[in-house]
Image (spheres, helix red, strand yellow):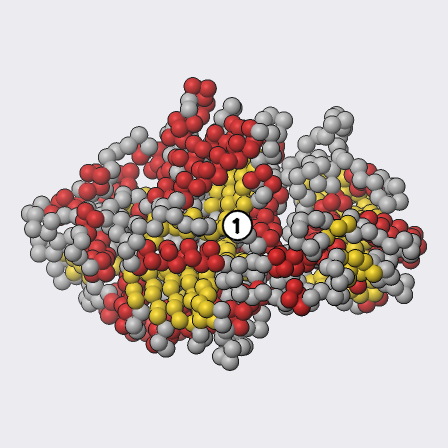
Amino acid sequence: LPPAPDRADLYHAVPGNPIHHPLAPAKLNLPALSNADLAKSSELFVKEYAELAFNQRVLHLALDKSLPLLDRFKFVCIVSSNLDEQFAKRLGNIPKVDDDDEDAAEKSRNFKRNVRPPSEFEEGLSAAVADIVAAQYDCLLNDILPALKKHGIEIVAYKSLSDEQKAKMRDYFTKKIYPLVTPLSVDQSHPFPLLASHGIYLVVTLLNPETSKTRIVYFRIPPVKPRCIPVSDDGLKYVLLEDVVLENLDMVCYGMEMLKVFPFRVTRNVKLVIDDVNFGESDNLLDFIWEETHRRRSAPATRLEVSDKMPKQIQNMIAKELFLDSADVYTIPGRYLGLAEFFSISFSNAPHLKLPVPEPKIHPKFAGLEEKLHDDPGRVFSVIRKRDILVQFPIHSFASSTLLFMRAAARDPKVRVMKCVLYRSGDDSPLVAALIRAAKSGKDVSVLIELKASFDEVQNSEYARRLQKAGVNVSYGLVGLKTHSKTMLVVREEDVGFRCYVNIATGNFNPGTAKLYTDLSLFTCREDISADVLDLFNALTGYSRQRKYRRLLVAPVNMLDTFCQLIDGEAEHARRGVMSRIVVQVNGLSDKKIAEHLYAASQAGVQIDLIIRGICCVVPGLKGKSENIRVFSWVGNVLQHRRIFYFSNAGKNLYYIGSADWRARNLNDRVEVIVPVDDKKAQLKLRKNLMFFLEGSPTETWEMGADGKYYLRKMAPAKPAGQEGTEAPVVPLTGQGAAVKTASGVDSQFAIHSAVAALPPTESGSARWSVTIDGKAHVVGSLNAGCVPVRERPDGTTEVLMITGDTQGQDKWVFAEGGLVEDETYFEAAERQGVRMAGVKGSSPHFLGWFIDSKHHVHKAIAVVVLAAKGDAEDWAEAYLRKREWLTFAGALNKSPEGPWVTKALQMAETWAASAGKDELHAVQEKLASMELKASATLERTNSGDGKVASLERTKSGDGKVASLERTKSGEVKFAAGSKPNEFKPTAVPEKVVEAKSSATKPSTGSEKQRSALQDRMKMFES
């Protein structure tokens, strides 16, 4: 990458490529550069450009016309929010100026140029931001808003309101706005006003009719919500708060005439960085934070946004007062400044204009515990004792997992100690309420609340005071470090003594963001992890030089070194010829030491996949340097916030999750925690999370090229081998050329391809295909694979499995179907979709045909196969979204199938089942049964504890039945002939072996190990 000529049509860059990209990898003499040089090279990575490139990918979602309108509007607002944050943090420290200095004000204002002199990238960065803003507003004003207006959603002018609506707005202004409006004039006795960061201002020229004199007056639009006020009964028409203020200014400036009005907006550097130098050992951090947050109101300005209608003279006047250069002034087309405050419109009551958002489900392990919270709060901890629990947000409910854990601890009389780190808890945090309740009930509660969390300093300070008042032991974090870890600890008194329960998460303990961010949360009571968390809290709330941890990776103690050792370990495996793999999902990668080790591992032969949402300093595909590295970025309807780390470790897979990204600030300047995930079921979930990005829908995944730019993968037509020169070549989806022999020996894959031909793409670059069905050609925008799962009951009846659509409460019934991934045939894709969507596994004996689904605005063709079901999948990925039911064909046809294609597929499957289908289905199921019996005959087990293995042999009866397990008096394991596979279970195991050992404080005994291994073998046999 950039894509080779023969693969160029598989990718496309962001429309328009607005960023003036300064990177030039081609200029580098790669052979002469060390890995350390690569990691530091500004030809490969510039942080500011990387941040803008991420915002560019967000902008692409706003430009994507295949998305619903309100979702596109939401992404327009997110682009502004991201730019606000970049400008607000861009300068670093707020200047500490001595108030007694006569030139304090001047020094503060000129601080921008003191700490950030003009750089080689400044002009390019300003142009890049301007290009992004231009594309953003062009999309908003000329595409999204006109389209929303057709659906009745509109930002209306105040003058267009009815008299009744104007009266309501006048009343609203009088009661809610007028007391907050202050006119600020500028003359000899009125200096230029202090303009608040992120505030919307009006500069108004007023005329005094009696004296004919004019004066310029500034008005700040009060920071009240909402900025977009609903004015219609259906809540779909909005008027802007500044328009309400403007049209009622006669109440503020009585008797004056308004000649000119122009809006503008200021952004200041509001980032706080506190260290030992400007803090001092004698100060109280809480009071210091209050002082700093107040002082940042006068921090240096970093950006001025003005309406394109504002005269240049007024622009220059305001910029001069703010000590800004022309490069810091951004002209906005129209009057919609500060789009980050327009989010409320995206929540308009128009569900047909936005993607459905499933409600979070209760995690199966926590099901029913909410109802038992009052009577038996300890039940939550008994569930965690059985095995580790991995919760996935927003799939699972925060209230029924993390919050339930804390509420149970607050109520449980056996809980003695609670400890927690709070970083961003959201408004009116129920977690804080639970901690206060626990303290008031007499429990020992300790909370470390990070006062230096950007933009949450004031709220966290308020929480700190409330917690202290309730009797909680509150710590404010460590000077010089931010405590960013997401950890909770509960100490409970039980029969075996004190036991610790731990919750370690990748995201904040915030019920709001848990619905919008993808995060993970691990609940465990493992002794080694619990001991590490105890040591960590001792270091955070007390005075400790803890340098060694048993299992945890803790920054800035051992995390960076451990990650480098894990990367180097994979490199060593690769040099010895062992298959080596690293897969990492984080929000950002900018640490130069990590980058250096990754380059070295790639050169050793390690296959490395980096799923980085934001900035990434590692560039893939550099010849001789990073050819084994791929970098992906997935930006979608929810924010990817998980941090997952996978190392193949010579077949002994290692999985980690936690709060840290691979950025220098996380590894060196923050307290972070990464925890190993040992539970096999939890590891499987983590693997699926990672593979979603590597093997999921290519149209949602960006891939970085060797030029440092990102390209969006797409399904694009190309001519397959042997088809050059044909007018309508076979569609070239990767892997489709491989024929799949079905149970009956028919090459159905050929039948699939013979009906499909590629067409020239649309003007926008979207792929098209022609699919011939019953002699008629249909033009479609996508090709999918689906399955009709069937099974034969003992009485000979054939049943079919139906599932509901993916919208909660939907009563329409469908079949599993979806797109293909790399190197996958239609049959493999159909089987995979059966596992993912319907939770059923099986084999495909028959191709039913092509079907057209015209429900969506882009028609799609679905190649549907029959799936001979062989049982439930181990993990049904969409169980939280759907219901399923086995039905007769007659019953299925009465279940309100969604769309004509579902009904037609049902009818064709019924016809097949009534003719040759039963024989094919029976043959497949016999083959599957034979494979399972063959596998079961190799099972081995011993209970002697001496390491000897006794083989489990089949009985000689020849009846196909499997022996059941029984224990002899000597302790040997034998089979009793005549039992069936589903009867395979221990029949005479001593009670001391079968009894569950719930105490995590006792060492494992031989009997416990035997029991665990025996259970594993039983699960293997059952599968």
Q: Is 988 above or below relative to 529?
A: below
- The front one of 162 and 580 is 580
| Image quadrant in which you'd find residue 758 | top right
Indicate whether 439 appears above or below 221. Answer: below
Residue 888, image x, y percentages: 83, 65
Query: Looking at this view, is 288 or 850 the one in front?
Result: 288
Q: Is residue 538 left or right of residue 647?
A: left
Q: Is residue 10 visible?
A: yes
For label 1, the SS is: loop
> For the N terminus, which image quadrant?
top right
Most distant residue in the bottom direction: 375
Q: Where is residue 560 drawn, in percent x and y?
A: 40, 41
Q: Which residue is mark 1?
A: 636
Q: Residue at x 48, y 71 (%)?
A: 494
Indicate whether 170 appears above or below 3.
below
Q: Residue most toward the front?
A: 970
Q: How many marks?
A: 1
Q: Is residue 951 left or right of residue 249?
A: right
Rendering quarter of residue 1009: bottom right
